[in-house]
Image (cartoon, helix red, strand yellow):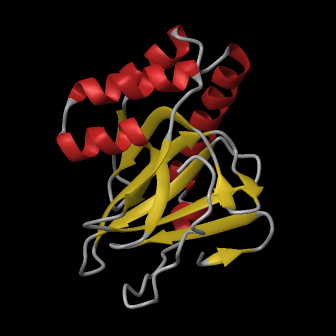
Amino acid sequence: MLADDGDRITLAYWPGIVSLAPCTWIASLETGDPAERDRMTADLVSGRWRLGRWTWRDTLWVSSQQVGDYFGIGQFFDPEHRLLRWYVNFQRPYRRTEWGIDTFDLLLDLVVEPDLSGYQWKDEDEYRQGRRLGVIGDAEHRAVQEARDQVMGLIDERRGPFADSWKINPMWPLPMLPPDLPGT
């Protein structure tokens, strides 16, 4: 964790860090099989997904999340610390647990150019599928719509996390997950 003022947290990932993620999401990344992504959504709908350990690779990533926000704003850097893109992940507001931070991905993302000059919505089809299948109810959908507007305002005004730039030292010691986490 780079920063935590009780209201906003800033997290960092770099190659070698282990976190928890749905097993079908991990499989989709490892195999590139689109059917695994479909299984991931089905697992979310059933409420019976399993978490597995995922080792971060290839890029450096910093994510900032405000209490109550339905999004986290991240920056992806290459190994030489050049900004590759901004990335907005729409998600349930984070909550603290005895093991760390927990949230739930709402299947919609926004990829923003490094200089904030353009953007592209990502996974809108998965979001619609999540809506159809009941993963994202009406109240949550309204919260995501408000979050979309809020994020676009932050980009246009170049404020909030879009005014920040963070640095990661990949030589920092790797944080470790507790060995007794449930669901792993």
Which residue in the rendered view is the most extreme toward the right? 6
Going 24% across and 81% down the picture, which residue do you hit? 80
How far from the left and from the top, in percent, is residue 92? 65, 39
Image quarter where the N terminus lies is bottom right
Image height check: is 147 above or below 125?
Answer: below
How far from the left and from the top, in percent, is residue 38? 34, 22
Going 53% across and 55% down the picture, which residue do you hit? 73
Residue 16: quarter of image: bottom left
Image height check: is 50 above or below 42?
Answer: below
Residue 2: quarter of image: bottom right
* 113 relative to 87 in the view: left or right: left
* 95 relative to 50 in the view: left or right: right
Image height check: is 66 above or below 125?
Answer: below
Which residue in the rendered view is the most extreme toward the left? 32
Between residue 119 and residue 72, name the one nearer to us: 72
How far from the left and from the top, in percent, is residue 183? 58, 46
Going 37% across and 19% down the picture, which residue do you hit? 125
* 61 relative to 33 in the view: left or right: right
Between residue 137 and residue 85, name the one nearer to us: 137
Between residue 184 and residue 92, name the one nearer to us: 184
How many numbered marks does the figure carry?
0
Going 29% across and 67% down the picture, which residue do you hit? 59
Which residue in the rendered view is the most extreme toward the front? 180
Residue 31: quarter of image: top left
